[in-house]
Image (cartoon, rainbow, N blue to C red):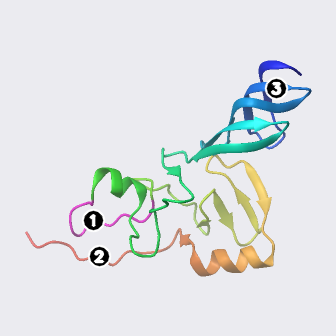
Amino acid sequence: MEGYGYYVLPTGAEYRGSLWDGMFHGKGELLLPTGGSYRALWDRGVATQGKCAFADGLEYDEEKWRYCDGYDRRFYTEICSGFKPPGIPQFTNLDPPKIIPEGCYDCGDGFYDPKTRVVVDYKRKFLRNADNDEHEWILRTCRKAWDITTEQKPKP
């Protein structure tokens, strides 16, 4: 493969850009199945410089990363659009958030069923089987379908 083209990897990621001797070479972009991308300058299959962008448009910057840094815990959509009025919580970067199937958890890249230990993406396509460490982490930290918010209702 040589010249400009595109190549779909077994993971579902797609490369669009320059190729040389079957390798990424020159300017090119990896489009990830989750909606994110990685634009880079490649040298014989190795990225020499590049920028990663998440599906919501947030660009990763290794030196000036200010998102979720410990001091500012806002979601990216809150940084771009501002806070919601008091009493209306925002639990995820997506607004409104994905509806979690009964008995499952939202683990960031899909839904996790603790009974089967399977993670599926938001379109219900198989992603992976969770090992013991991931299983425990999801149970400890991720949003559950049966979480009930206890927000105060404003008085009329």
Q: Magenta span: helix, strand or loop, mainly?
A: loop
Say which element carries label 2.
loop
Which of pointers 2 and 3 indicates the residue nearer the eye? 3
Q: What residue is drawn where x is 76% and y is 69%?
A: 117
Q: Which label sits on residue 151?
A: 2
Is 88 situated left or right of 100 in this image?
A: left
Q: What residue is drawn where x is 72% and y is 60%?
A: 119
Magenta segment includes 87? yes
Q: Are marks 1 and 2 in contact (CB under 8 Å)?
A: yes
Say which element carries label 1.
loop
Q: Nearer the viewer, residue 112 or 51?
A: 51
Image quadrant holding the C terminus, namely bottom left
Counting residues from the start of the chain, the first of labels 1 and 2 encountered is 1
Cα distance, mark 1 to mark 3?
49 Å
Outermost residue, right direction? 21
Magenta segment includes 108? no
Label 3: few (<14), some or many (≥20) within 10 Å?
many
Is 113 situated left or right of 94 in this image?
A: right
Q: Amino acid at mark 2?
A: Glu
Q: Give the residue pinned by disc 1.
A: 88
